[in-house]
């Protein structure tokens, strides 16, 4: 099924009349399960220009204390390439600098972040350590901004894996999904046009150098399904991404797995008028799934294996968890649907015998 889909996607993108596919290297990755939905030259080591700043941002965020304010040093200003126009002596927070990094693609912002997070050399070492931690063995950084270097490279696949990881961080996701904002006295408009061109887009970063060509990482979310698309050296990257994401989303169907109030299981009751009570779902759960994934989806009930009477309707009793290949996609709380009052204590045989004897 997966191979058929990939072939259909390649044909749709490459066949004349269906729209030319410009990227030298490309991939579409499921942002939750990590499944590859489409790949073309995805493991070729290539320069990635300012998409480097995905790693710069997540490394700085994970170091913590991004609301601290610092004074801009002269060496942070006048950096080659795109800029957020930092001014020497200016007081600015690291958080605001991150917005300048990701929305305006500020190379000066990247240098400032590295400088304020241990110094450039130490910070780049931290970027490479994070790459190793994430098992990105074909990724290496020379700098925090993406300017070309002989040992500054990644692959489309590893850049997608990095982005899927970064998108799980709420601060990172909030920044890269911002279309425009005003911070530190600057009105910033995100260079990532996907946020305006594609309804489901939620990030993340553009890049360009003459050597790397046009690079783009985008993320889109529909019906709870997050997809990551990457193209390296793609002259028509906006159209490439819209085509890739739409074709990938078409693979999935919106499925209601359980409805609020629906009985999904029963649980035994010890010492109650009822031997068991029904468990109902607290809310409706819907997921975007392919036909293949529906067959692989696992449903597991978590919680107590039995209850002791008395049991009241509406008691919380664990959860129903949906997993795909070991990855949790959703969970819904379960509650009891009926009461089961405690049985009156039954007298022992001796007590009943003594009860029959006449009072002496």
Image: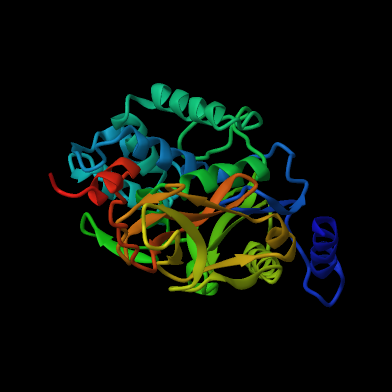
Residue 92 visible from this viewpoint? yes
Q: Residue at x 86, y 73 (%)?
A: 16
Query: How many badges with numbers are in the image?
Result: 0
The answer to whether residue 276 is above or below residue 154 is below
Query: Position of 238 compared to 265: left or right?
Result: right
Q: Residue at x 33, y 32 (%)?
A: 63
Residue 192 visible from this viewpoint? no
Furthest residue in direction bottom, as rendered: 17
Please provide percent x and percent y for residue 241: 64, 64
Name the one closer to the observer, 141 or 247.
Answer: 247
Name the one closer to the observer, 360 or 323.
Answer: 360
* Displayed quadrant of residue 19: bottom right
Q: Residue at x 48, y 32 (%)?
A: 143
The answer to whether residue 126 is above or below residue 19 is above
Q: How is the image coloured?
A: rainbow
Pick the quarter of the image with the N terminus. bottom right
Query: Position of 290 compared to 56: left or right?
Result: right
Name the one closer to the observer, 65 or 344.
Answer: 344
The answer to whether residue 24 is above or below residue 235 is above
Please provide percent x and percent y for residue 119: 34, 25
The answer to whether residue 26 is above or below residue 314 is above
Q: Residue at x 39, y 40 (%)?
A: 110
Pick the quarter of the image with the C terminus. top left
Please provide percent x and percent y for residue 226: 55, 59
Query: Position of 166 compared to 357: left or right?
Result: right
Please provide percent x and percent y for residue 255: 60, 72
Name the one closer to the observer, 314 or 258.
Answer: 314
């Amino acid at each position: 099924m997966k191979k058929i889909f990939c072939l259909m996607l390649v044909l749709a993108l490459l066949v004349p009349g269906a729209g030319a596919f410009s990227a030298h290297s490309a991939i579409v990755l499921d942002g939750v399960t990590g499944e590859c939905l489409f790949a073309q030259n995805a493991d070729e080591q290539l320069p990635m220009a300012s998409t480097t700043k995905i790693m710069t941002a997540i490394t700085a965020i994970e170091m913590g204390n991004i609301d601290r304010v610092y004074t801009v040093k002269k060496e942070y200003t006048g950096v080659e390439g795109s800029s957020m126009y930092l001014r020497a002596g200016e007081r600015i927070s690291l958080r605001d600098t991150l917005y300048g990094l990701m929305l305006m693609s500020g190379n000066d912002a990247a240098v400032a972040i590295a400088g304020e997070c241990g110094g450039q050399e130490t910070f780049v070492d931290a970027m490479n350590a994070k790459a190793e931690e994430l098992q990105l063995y074909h990724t290496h950084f020379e700098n925090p901004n993406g300017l070309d270097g002989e040992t500054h490279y990644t692959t489309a696949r590893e850049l997608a894996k990095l982005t899927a990881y970064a998108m799980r961080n709420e601060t990172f996701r909030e920044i890269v999904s911002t279309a425009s904002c005003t911070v530190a006295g600057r009105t910033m408009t995100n260079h990532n046009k996907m946020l305006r061109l594609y309804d489901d887009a939620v990030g993340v970063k553009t890049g360009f150098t003459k050597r790397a060509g046009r690079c783009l990482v985008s993320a889109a979310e529909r019906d709870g399904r997050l997809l990551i698309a990457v193209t390296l050296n793609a002259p028509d990257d906006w159209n490439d991404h819209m085509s890739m994401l739409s074709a990938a989303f078409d693979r999935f169907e919106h499925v209601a797995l359980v409805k609020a109030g629906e009985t999904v299981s029963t649980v035994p009751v010890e010492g109650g008028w009822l031997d068991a009570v029904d468990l109902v779902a607290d809310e409706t759960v819907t997921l975007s799934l392919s036909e293949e994934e529906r067959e692989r989806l696992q449903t597991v009930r978590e919680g107590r294996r039995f209850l002791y009477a008395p049991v009241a309707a509406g008691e919380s009793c664990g959860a129903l968890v949906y997993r795909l290949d070991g990855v949790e996609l959703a969970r819904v709380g379960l509650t009891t649907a009926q009461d089961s009052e405690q049985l009156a204590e039954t007298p022992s045989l001796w007590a009943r015998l003594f009860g029959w004897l006449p009072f002496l």
